Image (spheres, rainbow, N blue to C red):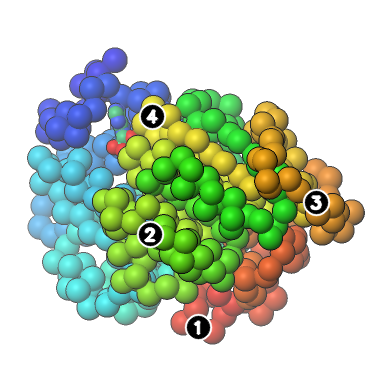
Amino acid sequence: MTFKDLGLSPALVKAVEEKGYTKPSPIQEKAIPHILEGKDILASAQTGTGKTAGFTLPVLQYLSETKHPKYRPLRALVLTPTRELAAQVYDNVREYSKYVNIKSAVVFGGVNAKPQIATLKNGVDILVATPGRLLDLHDRKAVSFKRVDVLILDEADRMLDMGFVRDINKIISFMPEKRQNLMFSATFSNDIKKLAATILRNPVSVETAPQNSTAKKVTHKVYKVDKKQKTELAIKLIKDNNWTQVLVFTRTKHGANKLTEKLIKAGISAAAIHGNKSQGARTKALKNFKDNSIKILVATDIAARGLDIPLLPHVINFELPNVPEDYVHRIGRTGRAGAAGEAISFVCSEEVEYQSEIEKILKEKLNSSVLEGFEPTDTAPPKRAATQSKGSFGKKKKQRPSNGNPGGSTDDKRPKRKPHFKGNKPAGATSGRGRTGAPKKKRY
Ligand code: ADP
Ligand code: MG
């Protein structure tokens, strides 16, 4: 099977060939024909398997075949949960659209809106955006959704998490009823699937691997270790193994800063990326990490979704995420496009339960070991209410704000359950956007 066989135009085939793709990935092979037919789809495929081209190529083909004669109303909208992912998807859109006459743009928060407004004014066929800034721009009449034919949610399950769902619904309310909806993610919980069904129309489900599974070439390793020994363990592993590019996930922004400082003190070049950093600092940290001018990027879950760092060999979970799907996304930053990768998790006594929840969704036991000199002595039980422990993920009404913890800080020192909300929105919420004074979301 070739890209041409899938029905893509020579201009698009040429662009992907220049990217070095020789044949479509399984998800591309499965999804592209349905999208070209105009179907709605709910697509699930492992991290790093080319989902971006899976939705971008057929949408570009549609846009270039059905050009509006006089002006360029916005006809395709891609929404992503983070600014970094928006920037990356936009880069892909630009590369893939090199030989078609399509205008694309990206908008996200944390940077000056003026140039974004100017770009939109000139007319854009396809826009990549994060929801908050997009709604701001819509309020300011810089963009209209009236002619949107195709809506794409990348990292769809995160986009439909509480927090984002209200923004998404608001954006949708300005769109024509008749449009194509595409949702892509590596993970979907049953709750999110139900929610997705309220947006999708007669969707085709496209899956290329068991749900929530991880890339095959990623090996998982767990080190049992005391909480207070984790920093030393990280330093030891990085130094002893001479690791030169490691993405380390912490649960909190504060924890990311603290660890970064200690790594630097130990002579290891590192930077932190999280929601309290300026966009300039975030962009710089990611760039320096990608071009190897720093060895370690310490991140909250802000960097867990979608980021493509080719050949990234190691991911460390300094703490386990308290939402098991986030594990899949975090470690999915390694083992991309068929490369090998290693995912290491530091698990202290408080986190044992998170580990079993992760193993449950992976349907696989993680290989646990103890490193000499780091034998755990702490036997504190998991700090969770017993009634919440078993099989509670995916239960009805349980909201899954992942790291959102709307209205609150995620900087708690120890793992704990997130608050439960009745229904779909936290009390008092009118809009998900910080600007309005409503509870903030996605504070990772
Ligand atoms: P996903 O969204 O599934 O996590 P991406 O779309 O970010 O994955 O793609 C992961 C990597 O694979 C990117 O570096 C991309 O350029 C590359 N890629 C995508 N499609 C192909 C293909 N058909 N052949 C080879 N590499 C590909
Ligand atoms: Mg992706």
Could you tell me which secondary element the residue under label 2 belongs to? Answer: loop
Could you tell me which secondary element the residue under label 4 belongs to? Answer: loop
What whole-number distance in Å separates the C-alpha atoms at marks 3 and 1? Answer: 48 Å
Could you classify mark 2 by the number of other residues whose Cα lies within 10 Å: few (under 14), some (14-19), or many (20 or more)? some
Q: Decide which of tag 3 and tag 1 comes sooner along the chain.
A: 3
Residue that carries the numbered disc 1 in the rendered image? 436
* 3 vs 176, nearest the viewer: 3
What whole-number distance in Å separates the C-alpha atoms at marks 4 and 1? Answer: 44 Å
Q: Residue at x 23, y 59 (%)?
A: 105
Residue that carries the numbered disc 2 in the rendered image? 269
What whole-number distance in Å separates the C-alpha atoms at marks 3 and 2? Answer: 30 Å
Q: State yes or no: discs 4 and 2 in contact (Cβ < 8 Å).
A: no
Could you classify mark 4 by the number of other residues whose Cα lies within 10 Å: few (under 14), some (14-19), or many (20 or more)? some
* Residue 323 appearing in the image: no
Above or below for 321 versus 66: below
* 109 vs 167, nearest the viewer: 109
Q: Decide which of tag 3 and tag 2 comes sooner along the chain.
A: 2
